[in-house]
Image (tube, rainbow, N blue to C red):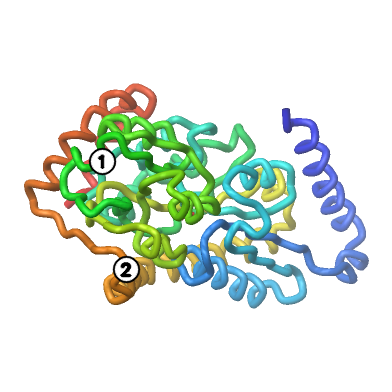
Amino acid sequence: MTIHPTRRRVLTTGAAVAGAAALPFMARAQSPIVVKLSHVVAEQTPKGQASMKFKELAEKKLPGKVNVQVFPSSQLFGDAKELEALLLGDVQFIAPSLSKFDRYTKKIQVYDLPFLFDDIDAVDRFQAGPKGQELLKSMVSRGLLGLGYWHNGMKQLSTNKDKLTRPEDVKGLKFRIQASDVLEAQFRALGANPQKMAFSEVYQALQTGVVDGQENTWSNIYSQKFHEVQKTIAETNHGVIDYMVVTNAKWWDGLAPDVRKGLSEAMAEATTYGNKIADDFNAADRKKIADAGKAKIQKLSKEDVAAWRKSMEPVWKKFEGDIGRDLIDAALKSNK
Ligand code: LMR
């Protein structure tokens, strides 16, 4: 239903670029291209920092040619709207969590399988390999081009209950999840009640008891203050939150070659920068949560982790057909 407006806007952009090429003296006099990057997390997070780095680098590499505007914290578009807005040309870059693309490709669900990746380094190795790189291009027919992966970290589970060591502790509880069918199945496998909800609504839902718990990285938990409205955070590391930076494929193709090159380089460098700091960010935020003394951090024994893994295992079988065994095997191989 968004096809017509998408075409119209993209063609307008394309026509402007073509016109500028025909009249180079006018192109030079033109004001910089406004490039909007929208995301849903706080600035003090790995994604927030990578976004600011991209702005700095892009404007340095393309002086006077681009004006990069970064909108954090769902200020411009939240989860529900950002992908549509990108396709409509209302924003040029977004970096949704990999869990939020399953309307566009089922293959990307590989990232949501519980206990698939041992750690973020394994995620990095998978993404750098042929299967991970293929996924960047897997949504081009839907108008989305992936330019790179940005890291956040491993997910932890939190609730408003005192006890959170074994799967039976979450039976019957309500959990906020990202818009992902795999995550829905994961919580159902635990006997819990998942509820898809935009990131910007989670704090209030936890505070008011609309949901009992959620799963997220240390940096997201800390920057959103979830630890202030939860009693226990179990260190499960059961899944990953990572991002794909996507742009509108037609807009990207219509850019002048020097602008596209500058933006590509800025993106590659910002990616390296952001991915280097992600682990440290999460470790520092874990410590801040522990120091704040509001929610208890529950460490888990090997046996506890094995119990969580066993309860979530049925999810793999359910999605293997859609994802493809080749992708799952490649992901498993990336664990050392
Ligand atoms: C969430 O919705 O919990 C995360 O995807 C937010 C984010 O972008 O890290």
Q: Quadrant of residue 235?
A: bottom left
Residue at 72% across, 76% down: 63
Q: Quadrant of residue 309?
A: top left
| Closer to us: 329 or 26 | 329
Name the element at disc 2. Answer: loop
Residue at 42% across, 45% down: 133
Q: Which residue is mark 1?
A: 170
| Closer to us: 65 or 287 | 287
* Residue farthest toward the front in the current orientation of the protein: 208
Residue 227 at x, y = what percent? 36, 63
Q: Which residue is mark 2?
A: 294
323 versus 33 height, above or below: above
* Residue farthest toward the left in the current orientation of the protein: 303
21 versus 80 height, above or below: below
Name the element at disc 1. Answer: helix
| Closer to us: 236 or 320 | 236
Q: What amino acid is found at the position of numbered circle 2 in the picture?
A: Lys
Going from N to C along the chain, the mark reached first, 2 or 1, is 1
Residue 205 at x, y = what percent? 48, 49
Residue at 57% across, 71% down: 52
